Amino acid sequence: MTVELVGTAERPPQSQNFAALYAQVQQFYAHQMQILDAHDTERWADTCTEDAVFELPFWSEPLRVRDGLAHYVRAGAARQRRAGSRLDHWVGMLDVHPQADGSLHTRCSALVCLAPSGDSARVLYVYVMEDVLVRTHGGWRTAHRRVTRDDLA
């Protein structure tokens, strides 16, 4: 007996090729977030295209990664070091949709956790992250990211 849930997202085609692609995208996000959490801003920026744009809920307009966002990430890393804490990013509930042009449209949940030195970590924010990923010579890169808060009732 098959049960269809009302309101679930359309499923992408199931195949070994798709399974391999899905694993690549999961690895991409794991790598990207670990670099971000390690405060390696330049390597993190390299996970994005040269003209990548991020739309973030705490900025009034979209930011180019290379021009403005990398500076913001560096400043945040310095604040965390001074405070003796760190932010950890966790990405899950990943949905991947291949496009006809070879790009990928992804949607996932992202948790941002604060880990104070000597204290228990706690979730600060819950976001929905919608990306356009493109394949380049070095692998997948983020070309566009829209982040929205998902923890505001």
Image (spheres, helix red, strand yellow):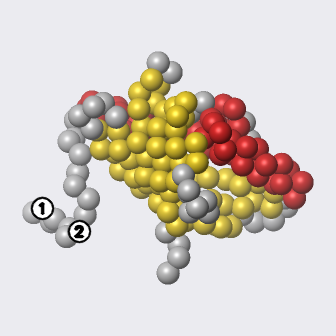
Residue 112 relative to residue 94: left or right: right
**Which residue position holds label 2?**
7
Q: What element carries label 2?
A: loop
Q: Which amino acid does label 1 sit on?
A: Thr
Q: Which of 2 and 146 is in front in this view?
A: 146
Give the mark, 1 or 2, whose residue is nearer the N terminus.
1
Quadrant occupied by the N terminus: bottom left
**58 or 36, nearer to the observer:** 58
Q: In which quadrant of the rendered view does residue 64 lie?
A: top right
Q: Can residue 98 be seen in this view?
A: yes
List the residue tagged with mark 1.
2
**Extreme-right residue of the structure:** 82
Q: Badge 1, how many Cα within 10 Å: few under 14, some, many 20+? A: few
Label 1 – label 2 distance at C-alpha: 16 Å
Q: Name the side, left or right, on which 100 lies relative to 20.
A: left
Q: Which residue is drawn at 52% across and 34% down?
A: 51
Left or right? Give the position of 125 relative to 96: right
List x then y, in percent, for residue 7: 23, 68
